[in-house]
Image: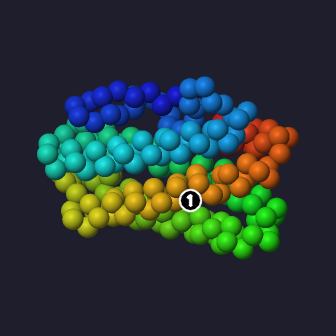
Amino acid sequence: MGMANMRIGHIEVTQPGSVPGLRSPGVGFEQPFEMLDACHDRVRRTLELMGKLQTHLQTHGCDDSARQAARDVQRYFDIAAPLHHQDEELHIFPALRERLAEDAPLLALVQRLEQDHREMDVLWNTQVRVSLQALIDGSSPALSPEQEHALLVFRERYEQHLALEDEVAYPAARQVVGVSEQQVMGEEMAARRQR
């Protein structure tokens, strides 16, 4: 099921009923690394939507478009992002740790990426999600300066994290994860999303 986009006001949002992060046109779980890359593309688009939401709130206030954008961002980081992190933690990071054990800088990077997952999860659940929920349910008409800052930190942290995975971790994993392993990896990734 794809992520169907439409424009409401000045903000691009998903149509109700679409499940974020499950499929991307032309990419399936039989190509797990390409699916991971597609997930990163969706994360970036969702982070961009979060930035557009912040701009929209400053210029138009918390209207229906803003609430829908907040719902879309919340939905993506509640559903798809945790599944993507699981993919990496179950398939990418262990492969790097086991097969490139002598590469101290790479192992340190894996530890950093795992720590990023934990810290981004805490930031999402304790600050960012709460801020978006207040917009969605109408209990807050705008973001406070502290909430604005939390969203900015979250976006910047994610961008840095994605760059490290794209530029270092994924290329290294592609070198050590064989074709038969990739098949199993893709099957397990798909199965997690059907639960």
Instruction: Name above or below for residue 182 compared with residue 27.
Output: below
Q: Secondary structure at mark 1?
A: helix
- 173, 1: nearer the viewer: 173
Residue 96 drawn at (x, y percent): 75, 60
Residue 33 in view here: yes
Q: Describe residue 185's horizontal placement relative to residue 23 as left or right.
A: right
Which residue is under mark 1?
A: 164
Instruction: Name above or below for residue 68 compared with residue 153.
Output: above
Q: Quadrant of the C terminus?
A: top right
**Numbered circles on residues, count:** 1
- 192, 163: nearer the viewer: 163
The residue drawn where x is 26% and y is 30% is 8
Residue 79 in view here: no
Residue 142 drawn at (x, y percent): 19, 54
Instruction: Name above or below for residue 139 compared with residue 68.
Output: below
What's the amino acid at mark 1? Leu
- 53, 179: nearer the viewer: 179
Q: Describe residue 96's horizontal placement relative to residue 1 as left or right.
A: right
Q: Describe residue 57's horizontal placement relative to residue 31 as left or right.
A: left
The residue drawn where x is 67% and y is 71% is 105
Residue 85 drawn at (x, y percent): 60, 54
Residue 64 drawn at (x, y percent): 23, 36
Q: Quadrant of residue 100?
A: bottom right
Q: Residues within 10 Å of mark 1 (few under 14, many from 20)?
A: some
- 143, 93: nearer the viewer: 93
The residue drawn where x is 25% and y is 41% is 66
Q: Quadrant of the N terminus?
A: top right
Q: Describe residue 41's horizontal placement relative to residue 187 as left or right.
A: left
The residue drawn where x is 23% and y is 34% is 10
